[in-house]
Amino acid sequence: MSEDLVEDLPEPDLALVYTIEALLFLAPDPLSAQELADATEAEEMAVIASLATLAERYAPGRSGIHLRELGGGFTFASDPETEDAARRLFSRPRASALTPAQAETLAIVAYLQPVSRPEITRIRGVSADSAASTLLERGLVEESGRSQFGAVLYRTTTQFLKLFGLRSIDELPDVAQWDPSPEEQAELRERLLRAGEARAGGDPPGVE
Amino acid sequence: MTLPALDLDLEIFSGPFDLLLALVLREEVDLLELELADVVLAYLDHLEGRGELDLETATEFIVLIAALLELKSRLMLAEDDEELLDIEPGEAAEELLERMLQARRYRSASTHLLELFAREAGVRFRGAPLPARLRKSIVPAGEGSQDPAVLGQAMGRLLRMPPTISLRHISTQRVTVAERLHHLRGLLRRGRFSFEEAVRGEDRMTVAVTVFALLELYKRGEAHWEQHESFGDIAVHAVAAAAPLRASAG
């Protein structure tokens, strides 16, 4: 919950806090303050005050359930400390690990969405079909219309934001931060050119 | 007999064939100005003079002349495409570099995502959807990539029988080479005419068939033609007794 929102909030109305708690318990997906305000017919500021109260009550260390702000809304999530028991209770682990190919494909979709499969393939240099299908199946990406050439476009889902602990896609760091430094780039360019010359045998391409 | 022994006496070159070849390849002789048909004729004369056919050199000659023809036809075409053919090695490296950087960028980003994923490991959410009776609407609002109304309309169109299209206004065009030949021969009686004049006001089909008719006239030795530039007008004239045999199309 954003720090700046907690200040200057009205005194929370207990009935509203209970209602919102119940709605959050029922909802399978994150609920935005706006959605909660519409459902409870309350002022948005009153809803935010109630959420602040709930966030305190469901804070790490105080409850097995935490109130998290994820995927554009608020949702209850289990305390990771409870995972071992949860795993014994439920047959399946929460989410299996991603393969490097799936993670790369997911990164490209996350940063460039909406993006088409051919574009992902072009960036990765290898086919992304199987990885993209798995991500679709796992609900981490979904279709989002078609490009002007008819290719299906993909975007990330709320499920993705939830599983990766993100409030919104804007929370991802700037992708440029992983670019190599100008010196490294220059060196890479140098190496490429040398390799190219070695392959061409030092001769300019001739007329056939 | 070997090919180098073939001596040529052409408008822009006289000397052995292999020298001509070397000069063309070094671009000292302009291939565009070289009448390849004359080279072929000279070779045929040469063969006739020898009275025997050496398959090996004949093959060599055909390969070389075919290569020259291809080269020449390429030269005659517009040169717009040339830029596309070769990318400078520097440019190629730049493009490759750009792609490598991009791949690297997203590979690093994927590492970051995996860290986030690991950090959130063990956090579970309510997995079950609401029971149907608690939902606002029984049919979940699917966010498809296409509008269902568009699909409905498309299906509707398929189910309707289209009216039979009347073809009455279409008449089959019949233009025969014989007809055009007759027409051309009529014009040829004047001695010469221009192709433009022969097909003035005609549709494309007729123009095309007229070209065939013209070829027929040429084949039978009744007419010759000249065209001085690509897409220029074609001047056709009746063959006088011993007109020089010469196809300007090269």
Image (cartoon, coloured by chain):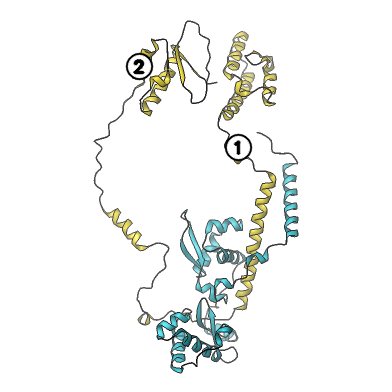
The chain assigned the colour yellow in the figure is B
**x and y, in percent, of residue A30 in the image:** 48, 79
Relative horizontal placement of residue B130, taking residue B161 as reference (left or right): right
The chain assigned the colour cyan in the figure is A
Residue B82: mark: 1
Where B115 falls versus A43 (above or below)? above
Q: Quadrant of residue B60?
A: top right
| Chain bearing mark 1 | B
* Residue that carries the numbered disc 2 in the rendered image: B183
Mark 1, Cα crowd under 10 Å, few <14 / some 14-19 / many 20+, is few
Residue drawn at (46%, 9%) of the image: B239
Mark 2, Cα crowd under 10 Å, few <14 / some 14-19 / many 20+, is some
Relative horizontal placement of residue B182, taking residue B68 as reference (left or right): left
| Residue A87 seen anywhere in this rendered image of the structure | yes
Residue drawn at (38%, 24%) of the image: B209
Q: Amino acid at mark 1?
A: Glu
**x and y, in percent, of residue A177 in the image:** 67, 66
Residue B158: mark: none
| Chain bearing mark 2 | B
Residue drawn at (58%, 92%) of the image: A62
Relative horizontal placement of residue B164, taking residue B207 as reference (left or right): left
